[in-house]
Amino acid sequence: MMALKRGQRSGVMTNVIVHGDKFALVAFETRSAVDLPPTELTPGLWASSESMIGLDGFWREVLGTIQVENFRSCTLFLLVKEHADDPAVDALDQALRDQVYRFYTGMLLADRYGTDQEPFLISGHCDPDRINVRQVERLEPARHASADRWHRLSTNEVRRGAEIGRAVQNFPMDRSVPSRSCSAPLHGSEDAA
């Protein structure tokens, strides 16, 4: 498990996820004009142009330095979270992953844009003194038939994507989403990157 002590790494907004929260986050790099502090755009969806978590040395070893650097180069982060009394992996973890993926789908429907790398889908929970990442997946990158690779997303387009994503929440979810997954074992590192 990843353990990031609060406030340990500059540029990481750790005050959005608090003790007892389970979360799922999609992080991706796009040419973006978005300058958005962590903001709840629609009920249950937070978006930010700054990271709300970090990946520590344990994940650097599991994913590799290049993948961790790819995460650090992400420019847009979508987060859903819910308070849970039990940090154990359960159906809530999958429900949060499905929910944030649907919001990401809203972003794909909101505008035609390109990404330079495969987005991350990350989930975990927050203990009293750290955020614990349990699973990291790489999603298929955004592909639009006539996408403009140089188009810059605006904050308004992100807000429109959040609204579309909220509507997509009512669609049935097919978890056959193409991705590559990496889960943490039951023990983890206390070191932060």
Image (cartoon, grey):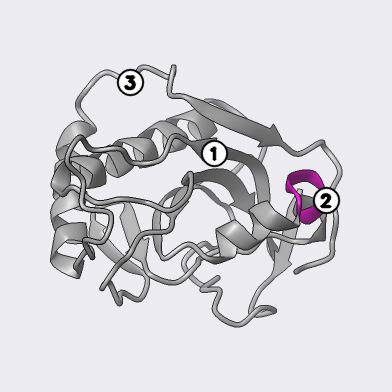
Quadrant including the C terminus: bottom right
Image position, residue 5 (x, y; %): 72, 71
Amino acid beneath label 1: Arg
Q: Give the magenta part as a residue range.
A: 60-64
Q: On the picture, is 15 further left or further right than 43? A: right
Q: N-terminal of the two: label 1 or label 2?
A: 2
Residue that carries the numbered disc 2 in the rendered image? 61
Give yes or no for residue 73 being in the magenta stretch: no
Residue 173 disc label:
3
At horizontal 69% and vertical 56% (from top left) the residue drawn is 66
Tags 1 and 3 touching, CB below 8 Å: no
Indicate the amino acid at tag 3. Met
As drawn, 61 above or below 86: below
Task: Residue 73: give x, y in percent of width and height.
Answer: 52, 65
Displayed quadrant of residue 47 = bottom left
Going from N to C along the chain, the mark reached first, 1 or 3, is 1
Labelled disc at residue 138: 1
Depicted 14 relative to depicted 183: above or below:
below
Of the residues tagged 3 and 2, which is closer to the observer?
2
